[in-house]
Amino acid sequence: RLRREPVPREDPICAATLDTRVETAVTSDGVQLRMKRYAREGAQPVLLVHGFFGNGLEFDLPHREHNLALYLAERGYDVWISSFRGCGREPWRCDAGDWHHSVDHLAALDAPALVEAVRAATGRRPVWIGHSMGGMVLYMYLQGVRTAGGEGELRVTLDPGLAEERNRSILGGIAIGSPPG
């Protein structure tokens, strides 16, 4: 039934009242990640990161009373709704790369690109709110996970120096429904 029905449209009242933009982040391996942004220039940025089998719609449902992104934007936050590689719907659909990726890729490649895109556009450190896998990626990101290895080979290692840098790159992090790190 769900596959036959179209995806619900954005609430027209929501869309008309806020500055909505499509923002792009590019990972170090060249994958384009698109984010929906309820822009509030100069406000505290909040990065919403979805869970496994999800996308940014987890936070941006087309119903005002069930929309965390809109709730935060209406209270003055600069809200960035992300989707990882291979996720999302147009116009926020993200490249998949070669489709041979895991949560390690998301933490080592996608997470740094998302955080850096928000910081570059706003000049501020975002607050990361991650649901389920989005919280797990936050844990990994803060531990300094990075890629190692040659072309066609991906190994993930922890870098203590990078962990310090990453912990300074965001203002804070909230994991919702994520197992402890």
Image: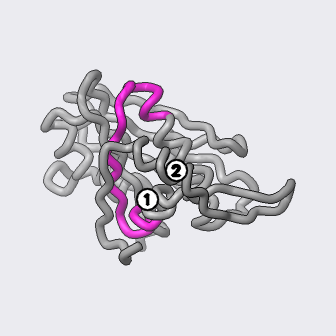
Instruction: Check the image and report above or below for 148 versus 94.
Output: below
Q: Which residue is mark 2?
A: 111
Q: Nearer the viewer, residue 17 or 53?
A: 53
Span highlighted in magenta in the image: 117-136
Where in the figure is residue 173, as x and y percent of width and height?
Answer: 32, 54
Task: Tell me which numbered mark, 1 or 2, is placed earlier along the sequence.
Answer: 2
- Answer yes or no: is residue 106 visible: no
Residue 107 to residue 162: above or below: below
Residue type, mark 1 in image: Leu
Q: Is residue 119 magenta?
A: yes
Residue labelled with disc 1: 138
Q: Is residue 80 magenta?
A: no
Tell me if label 1 and label 2 are in contact, CB under 8 Å. Answer: yes
State the CA–CA distance, disc 1 to disc 2. Answer: 8 Å
Q: Residue furthest front?
A: 161
> x, y (%) of residue 178?
36, 72
Q: Amino acid at mark 2?
A: Ala
**Percent coordinates x, y for residue 160 in the rendering:** 55, 57
Q: Residues within 10 Å of mark 1 (few under 14, many from 20)?
A: many
In the displayed structure, does residue 49 sit left or right of residue 114? left
In the picture, residue 36 is in which quadrant?
top left
Please report the residue visible at 52 percent of the width from the left and 40 percent of the height from the top.
Answer: 34
Image quadrant in which you'd find residue 30: top right
| In this rendering, position of residue 105 left or right of residue 13 | right
Q: Quadrant of the N terminus?
A: bottom left
Indicate the position of residue 119 as horizontal and vertical percent values. Answer: 43, 32
